[in-house]
Image: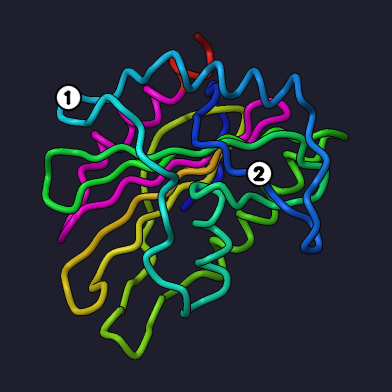
Amino acid sequence: MRRKRGIFAGVLVTGVLAACGGAEKAHDPRAMAQLHEVVSKGPQLPEGFTVRPEPAWRLPFVKGDKDCRALLEPAGGRAPDEALTAQVAVSYRGYELGEQAGVGLARYADAQAGGHLDELAGAMRDCRTVRTATGTHLRLLELPIGNVGDESVGARLRGRLNGYPYALDVVVTRVGDTLVSVVHTGLDDVDAGRTRQVVDAAISMASA
């Protein structure tokens, strides 16, 4: 759950365009083209993940703690709106039961990426548990992910989702003017080393 500094690059996702105040937000066509080109080159994900991307990862609960939702939404293509110029998002299925990797890339103008990461770091600090009436009870734990990107935050949510064992790793990284969001899910547990491999794969896609 610590904020860290290192060397990262980027991560990719479908053509999900953000909206501001209910109206379509103006995007930078060149930035959007660059993100789509990155996605089209294909991932270098860990063994066992599907090659072809699926639609953007979806938050598995709609109610529950607002800070936890804010932390997870960028990986599904719903990054903060202010100064957003381009955004894409996708997901990939893994071979483990319930395993899925969601990756999201959001590019910002006016040096706003750092401020948005600060906001997400605050949301992570305030995200303690997710509890709903449908049998969901997830608790936030620290995730040791190592140094990635210019600065980053990472955590694990673990417990039960609709009554079933569930775990989710989330890593959000700033790389220059871009926020890179990764989630890695599974039943009962998630391999932190495999999560880091997903993050590294996102780096290779963004820097290709």
How many discs mark residues in the rendered view? 2
CA gap between label 2 and label 1 equals 30 Å
Residue nearest the observer in this picture, 39 or 66: 39
Residue 156 point in image, percent of width and height: 35, 56
Residue type for callout 2: Leu
- Which label sits on residue 47? 1
What residue is shown at x 63% (from left), y 34% (from top)?
A: 174
Residue 134 point in image, percent of width and height: 30, 86
Residue 10 is left or right of residue 140, and the answer is: right
Near mark 2 (Cα within 10 A), the count class, few <14, some 14-19 or many ≥20, is many
Residue nearest the observer in this picture, 197 or 57: 57
- Which label sits on residue 90? none
Residue 18 is left or right of residue 75, and the answer is: right
* Mark sitting earlier along the chain (2/1): 2
What residue is shown at x 20% (from left), y 39% (from top)?
A: 94
Q: Residue furthest bottom?
A: 133
What residue is shown at x 28% (from left), y 64% (from top)?
A: 158
Residue 21 point in image, percent of width and height: 81, 63
> Which residue bears the numbered disc 2?
17
